[in-house]
C-alpha cells in the first residue's frame, strides 16, 4: 500500500490518506497517483476486502 492507512475499530473502518503526497503517473499516464492499496487487501479478522485508488489529473 502507498499512503493508505486502514484502521478497524469494532464495525467502523477508517481510511487515512495524505492528499499532499504524489507517487508519479499511473500506469496509463493519464493521472497522478496520490494513494493506492495496489489491488484488494483483506481487513484483519474480517472476510472483507478493500480496494482503493486516489488520483488526480496532472
Image (spheres, grey):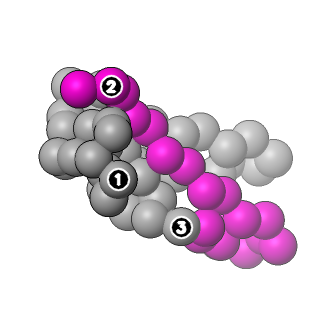
Q: Residues within 10 Å of mark 3 (few under 14, many from 20)?
A: few
**Residue span colored magenta:** 40-58
In this image, 15 relative to 1: left or right? right
Which of the labelled discs sits on residue 7, or is there none? none
Residue 55, quarter of picture: top left
44 is higher (above) or lower (below) than 33? below
In this image, 21 relative to 7: left or right? left
7 is higher (above) or lower (below) than 42? above
Instruction: Give the distance between the C-alpha atoms of the residues marked 3 and 2, in whole angstroms.
Output: 20 Å
Which of the labelled discs sits on residue 57, or is there none? 2
Q: Earlier in the sequence, mark 3 or mark 1?
A: 1
Per the image, the residue denoted by label 1 is 28
Which of the labelled discs sits on residue 39, or is there none? 3
| Location of residue 25 in the rendering, given as x and y in whole percent from the top left corner | 22, 46
Q: Look at the image and say whether residue 34 sits in the magenta stretch.
A: no
Q: Earlier in the sequence, mark 3 or mark 2?
A: 3
Name which residue lies at 27% across and 47% down.
29
Instruction: Give the distance between the C-alpha atoms of the residues marked 3 and 1, in whole angstroms.
Output: 16 Å
Name which residue lies at 53% across and 67% down.
39
Q: Are marks 1 and 2 in contact (CB under 8 Å)?
A: no
Amino acid at each position: 500500500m502507498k499512503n493508505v492507512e486502514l484502521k478497524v475499530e469494532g464495525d467502523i473502518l477508517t481510511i487515512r490518506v495524505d492528499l499532499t503526497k504524489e507517487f508519479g503517473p499511473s500506469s496509463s499516464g493519464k493521472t497522478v497517483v496520490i494513494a493506492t492499496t495496489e489491488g484488494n487487501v483483506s481487513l484483519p479478522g474480517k472476510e472483507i476486502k478493500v480496494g482503493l485508488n486516489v488520483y488526480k489529473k496532472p
